[in-house]
Amino acid sequence: MLATLDVLIGFTVVMLVISFSVTMLTQAFNSLFNLRGKALLQGVGSLITLLDKATLEGSANTIARKLLTNPLVARRTVFGGSDLAGTVHREELVKLILFEASTDAKLKSTINALGVADPLAVLSAVRMAELAFERQRPDIATDVRSTMAMIDHASSEFLARINAWFDQTMDRTSELFTLYSRVGTFVAALLVAFTLQLDSVHLLNQLSSDKAARTALVEAAIAHPEQFKPADAPASLPSPVDALKTIRDDPHLAELAQLHLIDPPAGPGDWWKKLSTASDPMARILGILLTTALLSLGGPFWYAMLENLLKLRPLLAQKEERLRAIRQTTQAVDYTPLPGALPAPPPVTPVAAAPARAVASTVPGSP
């Protein structure tokens, strides 16, 4: 029983270490394709459409792209350019729309119809009001000053619609980004699992037969479980080059390679050779797909699993030691029947053998 638990602990540690690589690749995908910015683009486009669906439905995404690539909020790319902003505050969005209305005829006519006659004049009045609030009440937070200035100088049906729909739209945007991240996680898990040809079934069998590797993983997990804790999301997403460098320098992956639990291929030819020379290539592929599904669960899932298994191990270890001591003892065991159990049968008394001629024979002619 304890050996089975150690196999599960070792398997969990391997999944947890590999999940770190999956997380790094997922963050690199998010940075490379700006998945957060693309989700926000759809959210802002929907919000602009709600201002006037008949007028802005066809050009809402174009307007949203202009707003999110404004230098005030745009995200800087690794190549020095600008990309879609990943976040935008409500007051920032209102100011960007007022500014963009000065050059976009459809947007300006929509805002005029919603109670803002001169967008640039309103924007200027809002800025001056924020400056006045900062002078009078420097203790108030910046977003509060912006909100108060908007209410005082941009109060209109336009502002009412933005304020009423902004939070709900951002909630849906977060859900869309979560979906994008899950897809990215699955792709990263598939890439890592196939690159390493990590077969979960083969890994379990290997941990069951390789006591040295199993013991090394369990001892490392017991001694320092915090070293396997997933790291918090970084303030800035890593570039693909930085992500690959971090994965390459990961000491935990090096330890798994030393224990022969993973075998990174030296190149495409080596990768194909390992797959083609497997005893059952189709079973290997199915095992890799299973690994992909398990890695998609994420590092936090496997860390919680490791914590639960480590809490259970001391109890099983104590039970195993007690049973081993009982099996190895040479002392007599005092057996006491449980209440309600059937009584033990009485001892059997051996019957003495009868004398050979204890009874006289009645057969005629006998002596």
Image (cartoon, rainbow, N blue to C red):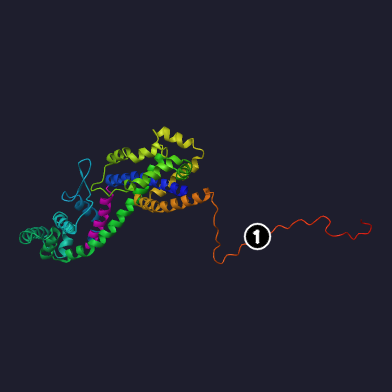
Towards the viewer: 225 or 136 = 225
Left or right: where 39 falls relative to 264: left
Towards the viewer: 72 or 228 = 228
Left or right: where 130 falls relative to 200: left
Amino acid residing under circle 1: Pro
Towards the viewer: 347 or 87 = 347
The image position of residue 127, as x and y in percent, is 9, 58
The image position of residue 299, as x and y in percent, is 35, 49
Towards the viewer: 55 or 96 = 96
| Figure quadrant of the C terminus | bottom right
What is the crowding at mark 1: few (fewer than 14 residues within 10 Å), some, or many (at least 20)? few
Provide the secondary structure element on which disc 1 rests: loop
The image position of residue 327, as x and y in percent, is 53, 49
Figure label count: 1
As for residue 50 lying within the magenta part, the answer is: yes
In the image, residue 38 sits, relative to residue 132, either above or below, namely above
Is most of the magenta stretch helix, strand or loop? helix
User: On the image, which quarter does residue 264 sit in?
Assistant: top left
Q: Is residue 190 visible?
A: no
Residue beneath the point at 5% across and 60% down: 132
As for residue 77 lying within the magenta part, the answer is: no
Left or right: where 229 falls relative to 3: left
Residue beneath the point at 25% across and 51% down: 37
User: On the image, which quarter does residue 174 sit in?
Assistant: bottom left
Q: Which residue is mark 1?
A: 347
Left or right: where 184 falls relative to 52: right
| Magenta segment | 34-51
